[in-house]
Image (cartoon, rainbow, N blue to C red):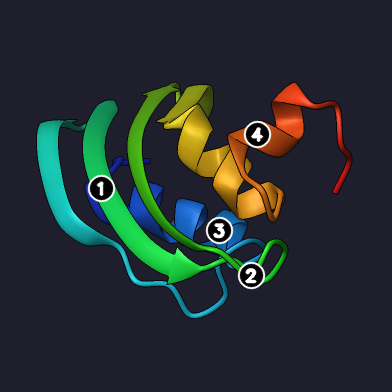
Amino acid sequence: MVLRSEDVIGFLRFLHRKVYPGAVFENVSIHIETPNQALDEYHLTAKSEISGNTVHQQFLGHLMVENGKINLLRELIDVVAAAEAMFPGGLGDVLRGESA
C-alpha cells in the first residue's frame, strides 16, 4: 500500500460529512508526503447542521502506514470552532454545562 495525501483527505471528508454536509476543504497544505506517512493541514468554512452556526475550522491530519496497514491516524482540530459546530451558543454553552 502506498499512502497518498488524497487518501487522508478522502477519509476525513467521509467523517466530516456528518457535521458539515457539503463542506469543501480549502487551503490544503501538504507538509509531509512519503510512501508511509502524510501530514496535511486544511480548512473549511461551513454551516453546521447540528448548531446552525457558520464555523471556520482548521484541521491537521497525520497518517502513518506500516506493512500496508494504518498504524497511526491523528487529527487535530480547533476545539473552540468544534464547540461552535456542536452547540448553538458555542463555547459559552460548554462552559455553562449545556448539552446539545
What is the spatial separation of the Cα atoms under label 4 and label 1, in whole angstroms?
26 Å
What amino acid does circle 1 point to? Answer: Tyr
Identify the mark nearer the N-term, 3 or 4.
3
Residue at 29% x, 41% y is 2
Please, what secondary structure does the residue beneath circle 4 have?
A: helix
Please, what secondary structure does the residue beneath circle 1 have?
A: strand
Please, what secondary structure does the residue beneath circle 2 have?
A: loop
Q: Quadrant of the N terminus?
A: top left
The residue where tag 4 is placed is 92
Characterize the local packing of mark 1: few (<14), some (14-19) or many (20 or more) Cα atoms within 10 angstroms.
some
What amino acid does circle 4 point to? Answer: Gly
What is the spatial separation of the Cα atoms under label 3 and label 1, in whole angstroms?
12 Å
Whether residue 68 is visible, yes or no, is: no
What amino acid does circle 3 point to? Answer: His
Percent across and percent down for residue 68 are: 45, 31
Q: Between tags 2 and 4, which lies in front?
A: 4
Characterize the local packing of mark 2: few (<14), some (14-19) or many (20 or more) Cα atoms within 10 angstroms.
some
Please, what secondary structure does the residue beneath circle 3 have?
A: helix
The residue where tag 2 is placed is 52
Whether residue 39 is visible, yes or no, is: yes
Q: Between tags 2 and 3, which lies in front?
A: 2
